[in-house]
Image (cartoon, rainbow, N blue to C red):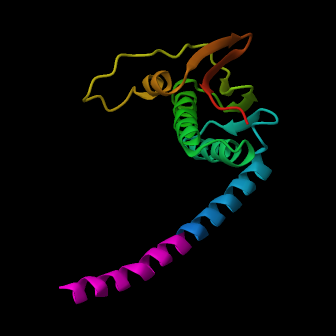
Amino acid sequence: MMVGMAGLEGVDQPRRRGSAVAARWVQVADDEQALDMLELFGNPAEDEVRLPSRPQSAATARRLTQCVVLRQWALGPQIAEHAVLLVSELVGNAVRHTGARVFGLRLLRRRGMIRVEVRDPSRGLPCLLPVREMDTSGRGLFLVDKLSDRWGVDLQPRGKTTWFEMRVADR
């Protein structure tokens, strides 16, 4: 029995190393994709990035957010995970509900917090709806409300900015 377990450990070990190597290649590819997106669209931490109002733009917004939060600001993976999820929800709402051709994404880092803003030309306000267990949609603002420290909407002369803030440890 011990011989069998030793044999299995020997087989598992290369797989783990192979997985680590594969994970590293994926990370390098992700880094290159993130850098390509920063070059193509701009850095939302430096200025508002304008993205086309298409479902594919949610992936772009997630990648840009992850790149800024993890790499540029060096914040933890849980903050990045929550920020990426919530930006996806705000972008999804802008794409689905505003009729906009483009929307703006902006990331701000201030002392002790980050702020993510999604600006669109619609003045229609998002609604936080009650969520039931079996609901298959309508959970976006519920997640924003639960995972962020604050969120809101600022009406502009032409459109609105929907935003959320998350507390972070200062460097």
Q: Residue at x 66, y 24 (%)?
A: 120
**Residue 48 figure quarter:** top right
**Residue 72 figure quarter:** top right
The C terminus: image quadrant: top right
Q: Which residues are magenta?
A: 1-22
Q: Would you place residue 128 above or below residue 71 in this image?
A: above
The single residue placed furthest to the front in the displayed view is 2
The N terminus: image quadrant: bottom left
Q: Residue at x 43, y 23 (%)?
A: 142
> Is residue 8 or residue 55 the one in the foreground?
8
> Is residue 50 or residue 54 the one in the foreground?
50
Q: Is residue 59 left or right of residue 107?
A: left
**Residue 79 figure quarter:** top right
Exactly how many numbered labels are in the figure?
0
Q: Is residue 32 left or right of residue 58?
A: right
Give the x, y percent position of residue 121. Answer: 67, 21
Give the x, y percent position of residue 101. Answer: 66, 32
> Is residue 78 or residue 151 the one in the foreground?
78
